[in-house]
Image (cartoon, grey):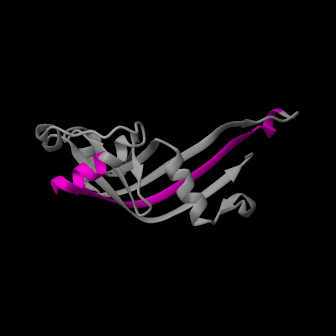
Amino acid sequence: MRRKEREITSREELDAILGFSNIMNLALSDDGMPFQVPVFYAYDGTAIWFHSAYAGTKMEIMRRNPLVSFAVSVDQGHVESDEACDFEARHRTVIGFGKALFVENESEKVKALDLIVSRFSDRKFTYPKASVENTAVIRIEIVSMKGKKHGV
């Protein structure tokens, strides 16, 4: 990392950032062409989980190339300056790399959906069997991640 003083090296701080935000930018690559999409997600300390319809561009790309990158940023805003070119982003950001795996086991899918829903509500839900069957759940096995912060 070029700006070592901004690097986040604490796993606890990286985990806190991933645990704080609800939206992750997921980056995929298809035949050399990048594709990025925001998704709701959950992080359990070891993997990232998200859900999707079975059809669509991101699903098609992940079937061909399961290698992904992800980014989560919090505390967004800017640090003002008296000089026009000296404004900077205020943020804590985690960027990571991993492999997308499609979850087929129904109980594992429900567990992942519970993790995702718990980000938005304290209520407990049951999912109709048809909804679980028609919802794709993806687990990202994290290969590596790093963080950066500034202005916080």
Res. 14 visible in picture: yes
Q: Quadrant of residue 101?
A: bottom left
Residue lying at 23% horizontally and 51% vertically, measured from the top left: 109
> In the rendered view, does 141 fall on the left or right side of 9?
left
Residue lying at 30% horizontally and 51% vertically, measured from the top left: 112
The answer to whether 24 is drawn above or below residue 13 in the figure is above
Front-lying residue, 94 or 21: 21
> In the rendered view, does 101 fall on the left or right side of 36?
left
Q: Position of residue 148 (x, y in %)?
A: 64, 55
Front-lying residue, 99 or 129: 129
Q: Position of residue 99 (x, y in %)?
A: 34, 61
Q: Position of residue 17 (x, y in %)?
A: 56, 51
Q: Which residues are magenta?
A: 84-113
> In the rendered view, does 28 fall on the left or right side of 63?
right
Q: How many marks?
A: 0
Residue lying at 29% horizontally and 46% vertically, measured from the top left: 113
Task: Single out the residue that lies furthest toward the right.
Answer: 82
Res. 63 visible in picture: no
The answer to whether 64 is drawn above or below residue 84 in the figure is below
Q: Position of residue 146 (x, y in %)?
A: 56, 61
Q: Quadrant of residue 139?
A: bottom left
Quadrant where the N terminus lies? bottom right
Is residue 111 in the magenta section?
yes
Is residue 115 in the magenta section?
no
Residue lying at 35% horizontally and 37% vertically, measured from the top left: 123
Task: Single out the residue that lies furthest toward the front.
Answer: 123
